[in-house]
Image (cartoon, grey):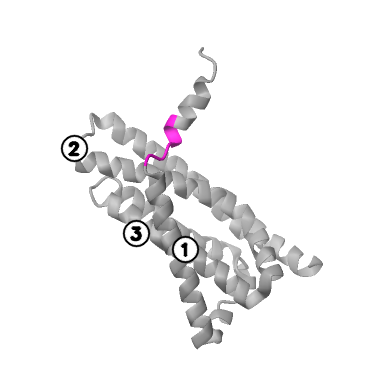
Amino acid sequence: MKKGFYRQYFYKFTRMPYGSIFLFLFLGGFLGGILFANVAWNIRPSAITGLNLLSAGTWITVDGSVKDYLKYLAGVRMKAPVMLMILGLTSFGMAAVYLGLLWYGFLGGLLCSAALLQLGLRGMLKLFGCLLLPMIFYVPTIALLLNQAFMMSEKSSRKEVENLGEYGRYLMLCILILAVFGLGILVECYVNPLLIEMCRKFF
């Protein structure tokens, strides 16, 4: 077997030919989130402090049931990826990816600014430390999904899908992505509250 075969295959599988466009849209949404948070803080600080960022990931705030929180979290986290997967099979998938990048960027900018305004720099770093574990699952997976859904949608819109095997490979990838998302949800539901509680006690 040729040396570096798996490395080349992995690069080909996860390449992002539209990376610069994706990055530009994400950063545009990120900047919008920062501006929105700062404007909201200047007009009504309670709108930011009301986010109660330090309680993010604590299942007690739902209704005291871990299983109910798991169901709630799965519904919240899975809606956008599943919709994006479905739209990736149509010509609307490219527009959905663009909107998704803007939205995720906006949420990232909003979270960073709100955490800094509400908690200060040290508190913001602690918050992101608590969120790091589930983000390890979410961020690479959503990046891969956005890339694959865009390319599949582009092929569908141009009628360049050669056979049903391409659809099959896309669907198998979607199942794999959902499985990784599921792991992230389990970590966020069962592990993250413990991590946040540890941060509260020791920091």
Q: Which residue is mark 2?
A: 159
Asked if residue 15 lies in the magenta stretch, the reply is yes
Secondary structure at numbered mark 1: helix
Which mark is first along the chain, 1 or 2?
Answer: 1
**Residue 23 location, x and y as percent?**
43, 52
Say above or below: 65 vs 19.
below
| Residue 115 visible | yes
Residue 71 pos. (x, y %): 50, 61
Q: Say which mark, if any, is on residue 116.
A: none
* Callout 1 amino acid: Phe
Q: Kindly state the secondary structure of the residue where label 2 is placed.
A: loop
Instruction: Kindly identify the residue that appears in the image at 41 percent across and 54 percent down.
Output: 24
Observer-nearest of 69 and 25: 25
Residue shown at the point (47%, 59%) measured from the top left: 77
Q: Residues within 10 Å of mark 3 (few under 14, many from 20)?
A: some
Percent x, y of residue 108: 51, 63
Element type at mark 3: helix
How far apart marks 2 and 1 lie (CA) works out to 34 Å
In this rendering, does residue 75 appear at all?
no
The amino acid sitting under disc 3 is Leu
Label for residue 99?
3
Q: Find the magenta span and give its range.
A: 12-17
Q: 36 or 90: which is nearer to us?
A: 36
Q: 28 or 106, which is in the foreground?
A: 28
Mark number displayed over residue 30: 1
Residue extending furthest toward the top: 1
Camera-near label (2 vs 1) is 1
- Residue 113 in picture, x, y percent from top left: 56, 71
| View extreme (left): residue | 159
User: What's the CA distance linking mark 2 and mark 3?
Assistant: 23 Å
